Image (cartoon, rainbow, N blue to C red):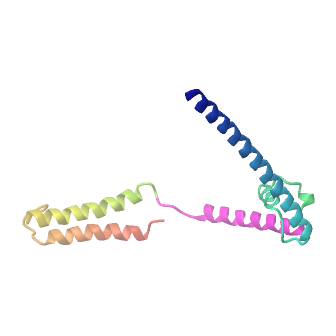
Amino acid sequence: MLMADEELHETTADTQEDWQSEAAESTEETTDNDAVAESAEDDDDLDIPMDRVEAVLNATVDKDSLTPQMQRMMNRQAENTRRVEETINGTKSNPRWFVPLFCALMIIGLIWAVTYYLSGSYPIPNIGAWNLAIAVAIIMVGFLMTMWWR
């Protein structure tokens, strides 16, 4: 009984692989036939197969065999790429220490205020509520730095 189940399982797996390969082949044939039928029905420049568009975008196609629409598309892509590169080169960025500094200032200000509320006199004793003013000032410096972040 066990041997028959194993043979049946192996046969089913082989049959399933055959069905999958047949289905993949028939799908490819159907896709190719549909693409040929669609291109035969519509001869205008608006229906371009995606593989040709990708080839153009990747610049792997002979530029002499391109349609005018595809040439315009390549020119637009080149212009957009040039503009993006100019924009990237023209941008300024902050030094690496800028973000950690303003985050640290806001956290230090928060810890200063919490310490004052919990202790009543610390971090600087004998100045009272001015500890809160110092905490708010440190936090505000951190927030102001966020406005200059690029």
In depth, the one of 28 and 104 nearer the eye is 28
In depth, the one of 99 and 22 nearer the eye is 22
Q: Quadrant of residue 107?
A: bottom left
Asked if residue 21 is positioned above or below residue 97 in the image, the reply reads above
Q: Main secondary structure of the magenta part?
A: helix
In depth, the one of 104 and 54 nearer the eye is 54
Whole-percent x, y for residue 142 in the image: 33, 66
Does the magenta segment cover residue 71? yes
Does the magenta segment cover residue 2? no
Q: Is residue 93 left or right of residue 79?
A: left
| Image: magenta residue range | 67-94
Whole-percent x, y for residue 59 in the image: 80, 55
| Residue occupying image coordinates x 92% and y 66% | 40
Q: Is residue 79 left or right of residue 90?
A: right
Asked if residue 86 is positioned above or below residue 4 in the image, the reply reads below
Whole-percent x, y for residue 103 in the image: 34, 61
| Residue occupying image coordinates x 36% and y 71% | 144
